[in-house]
Image (cartoon, rainbow, N blue to C red):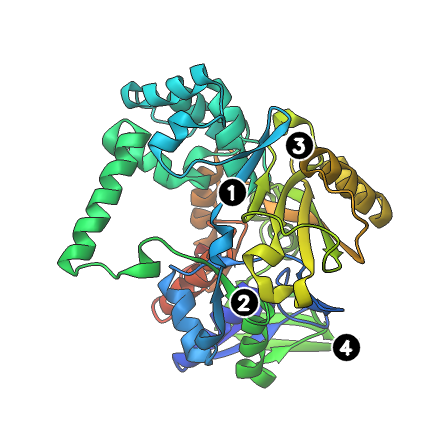
Amino acid sequence: MTVAVIGGGITGLALAHRLRARGTAAVVLESTSRVGGNVQTHARAGYLLEAGPNSFLDREPTTRELAETLGVSSRIRPADAAAKNRYIFTRGALRALPGSPPAFLKSDILPLASRLRVVGELFSGRNPTGSDESLAQLGRRHLGREATAVLLDAMQTGTYAGDPEQLSAEATFPQLVKFEREHRSLILGAIRAQRAARRAKAAGTAEAGPALSGQMSTFDGGLGVLVDALAKALGGAVRTDAKVEGLERTADGWKVRFQERGQPAELAASHVVLAVPAHVAAELLRPLDVELAQQADSIPYAPIAVVHLGFAAGTVPKPDGFGFLVPAVEGKAVLGTIHVSTTFPFRAEGGRVLLTCLMGGARRPEVVSRDEDALAALAREELKTMAGLTATPELTEVVRWPRGIPQYTVGHLERLAAMEERLKRWPGLHLTGNAYRGVGVNDCIREATRLADALGGPAEGAVRSA
């Protein structure tokens, strides 16, 4: 059996590696000259910059297993203790995110009436219809309007950069929906889940440490360490500058037609996995199945601009904590800022300070279309307003992602179910990627592992996220 993996991002690489470890032949076809997708680490004059994801929570067993298999688990670095504090820019000021219920009641993160409304969540009710609803609808029912507009919006912004009025609660934060269904109250659900985890840990039936809570982590050379290790392990199984142009169902599998460095080529495979963004998958699917292509193409993306600002040692104070998030009600282009040199000090040499601003998102897509100089100037202007930062950076680098983060809008899970049903018409054809069931690095690796293991069984189509 040969599996053709189209797309050399973290999903495709992890999938191919797992397949080959199981003794299955796998070939990765990547259209560009490099692998890794939006996982890109660059060294720049004393700074280590991430163009895409900055970190992962070290609690996903498949991620840890992959790192160990590749021999890079010893290079995992947890966030510095100084990064424990987090902030939200709300009501015109940076305010600390409280770490406990008593601290929340004493804090100024929300006005008193809104804090008391959150406490009243203990008496809130379940979704009256039981159908999929927006994250904002769930939030207002349980937490009230202001907590939803500030706290819940900030939480989703840090992951999806989306619009909570459009995002599906169940697809984006399934744990909250589970708490509501099983315990009625989100607070009660969280309390009971924590108690159950402590009991399991005490009884020795759950893995202690990262598996229960998870530490924000990266590698000592950035996330690119994992990509490089995967590429090295796969060796010649990865073919770059190989742009797939068509798929054809054959009597015993699939034929993949592609251009490799300008030359036409073909690959026969028993399975084909499209580990590419949804809109790219749609283009490949359209000649085969217009309806399936339309379903994939209907998954929207939020554009994101990543603005790195590096400051020479001594020119700015060391920022406190991990960073801050900015709810949409504040009307800013900056969605949030990561204090990279505080969180991972090794990513800025010699006492330098590195900040990474995320800009744009689903509600400010026009921001990302600005040129790089304009984006950097806007980031500095808003940092001055929000954090009082006036120094001139010695390094500025801007990365724009016109299709940055998939948006799991209301009805997303129903869409996936329809796609899975449609895929049954095409045995041996599979979709995977962060457009489906998880946008993070851990999601990618976990779902790639599941699909690789599933391919040992019948060749039925499946939509797997990664």
Q: Earlier in the sequence, mark 4 or mark 2?
A: 2
Tell me the number on the disc at residue 86: 1
Q: At 67% across and 52% down in the image, what residue appears?
A: 355
Helix, strand or loop under label 2? helix
Distance from disc 1 to disc 3, alpha carbons, whole Å, reads: 23 Å
- The reply to whether the C-beta atoms of the residues labelled 2 and 3 are less than 8 Å apart is no
Residue at which label 2 appears: 12
State the image coordinates of residue 57 (x, y, percent, origin top left): 44, 57
From the image, state whether disc 1 or disc 2 is nearer to you.
1
* 202 versus 408 height, above or below: below
Number of other residues with Cα within 10 Å of mark 3, as a class: few under 14, some 14 to 19, many 20 or more? some
Decide which of 173, 435 is in the foreground and name it.
173
Q: Is residue 235 left or right of residue 138?
A: right
Report the residue that reaches farthest toward the front.
314
Distance from disc 4 to disc 2, alpha carbons, whole Å, reads: 20 Å
Distance from disc 4 to disc 1, alpha carbons, whole Å, reads: 47 Å
Tell me the number on the disc at residue 363: 3
Number of other residues with Cα within 10 Å of mark 2, as a class: few under 14, some 14 to 19, many 20 or more? many
Tell me the number on the disc at residue 135: none
Q: At 45% across and 43% down in the image, what residue appears?
A: 418
From the image, state whether disc 2 or disc 3 is nearer to you.
3
Tell me the number on the disc at residue 261: 4
From the image, state whether disc 3 or disc 4 is nearer to you.
3
- The reply to whether the C-beta atoms of the residues labelled 4 and 2 are less than 8 Å apart is no
Q: At 13% across and 57% down in the image, what residue appears?
A: 203
Q: Earlier in the sequence, mark 3 or mark 4?
A: 4
Q: Earlier in the sequence, mark 4 or mark 1?
A: 1
Helix, strand or loop under label 3? loop
Q: Earlier in the sequence, mark 1 or mark 2?
A: 2
Helix, strand or loop under label 4? loop
